[in-house]
Amino acid sequence: MSTATTADVDSAGMSFLESIPRRAVTVYLPLLVFLFVLLFPFYWMAITSVKPDAELLSREGNPFWVVGATLTHFHKLLFETSFPAWMWNTVLVSVVATAFSLAAAVLAAYAIERLRFRGSRHVGLGIFLAYLVPPTILFIPLANVVFKLGLFDTRLALILTYPTFLIPFCTWLLMGYFRSIPYELEECALIDGASRWQILVKIVLPLAVPGLISAGIFAFTLSWNEFIYALTFISSSEIKTLSVGVVTELVQGDVYQWGPLMAGALLGSLPVAIVYSFFVEYYVSGMTGAVKE
């Protein structure tokens, strides 16, 4: 009797959306508002990057449209600034720091969740709390360490300091994912004589691919957009990362070069968007902690 009542309630609830006006108000209108709020900054960035300087400075005409589009700002950005070097530095630092952080996080998360040593939960909690420490506090002592090691104004300074906030986050994320993998799989492998390393490489990691991709995407995005460390530890123009180079080199005093600035922001946001578009399915399943049997 209760099952039939629940089914009737569910069907009545779904029938509420069968009416087109109700569906438009409850589904489509909120989605349109959300998309507008989300995509308008990218639209504004795109049209500003192709607007001539005359249109950018003019108070006449429609500010939300372009009359005479131009690629002058992109030409200036690519050939008159160090933008290609900034892009290469950002890619190099982000990829290396992400790879190193993922390798360390996999070992740490597996040890905490699977080896069951005394105090493992406290270690996991400590790692998570380390992630909550703001980078704006950590960069002060890290700057002293980087300077004493002779790494100031080098890419290695960023590669070695980014894992200080990437490893805690990736470890915390992978701990939750490893927790969802059944213990019975490892117990059977141990009975068959497999070592812990073989279990990790041949059983756990293949099942944890969505979690690894999710942690990798987050780590890559955090490295790509990081600003404080890159601003503090790098001073040479040719070694700067994208987030710092565009802001510091294209803003001269109170003069903002809006065209090249928006062009740099647009080109700088494309790699992250491409990465997300390719791995969105793994990203969603990794965030839900799903394991396919």
Image (cartoon, grey):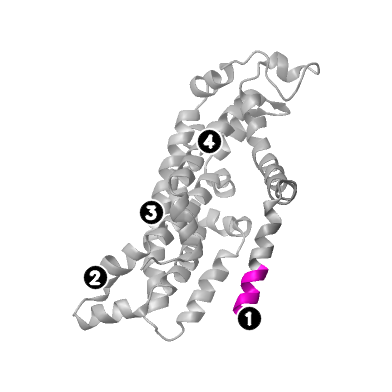
Secondary structure under the numbered disc 1 in the rendered image: helix
Name the one closer to the observer, 286 or 71: 286
The amino acid on which the numbered mark 4 sits, given as a three-letter code, is Gly
Inspect the magenta stretch and tell me whether residue 84 lies in it.
no
Give the amino acid type for the residue marked by disc 1 in the picture: Ser
Residue located beneath label 1 in the image: 2
| Picture disc at residue 198 | 2
Q: Which residues are magenta?
A: 1-9
Q: Is residue 161 visible?
A: no
Q: CA distance from mark 1 to mark 2?
A: 49 Å
Per the model, the C-alpha gap separating discs 3 and 2 is 20 Å
Instruction: Compute the Cα span from label 1 to label 3.
Output: 53 Å
Q: Residue at x 69, y 27 (%)?
A: 256
- Number of residues whose C-alpha sits closer than 10 Å to that of mark 2, classed few (under 14), some (14–19) or many (20 or more): few
Q: Position of residue 54 (x, y in %)?
A: 71, 13
What is the secondary structure assignment of the residue under circle 2? helix
Q: What distance separates the C-alpha of mark 4 from that of mark 2?
A: 40 Å
Residue identified by numbered label 3: 99
**Circle nearer the viewer, 1 or 3:** 1
Quadrant assignment for the C terminus: bottom left
Q: CA distance from mark 4 to mark 1?
A: 56 Å
Q: Which residue is mark 4?
A: 268
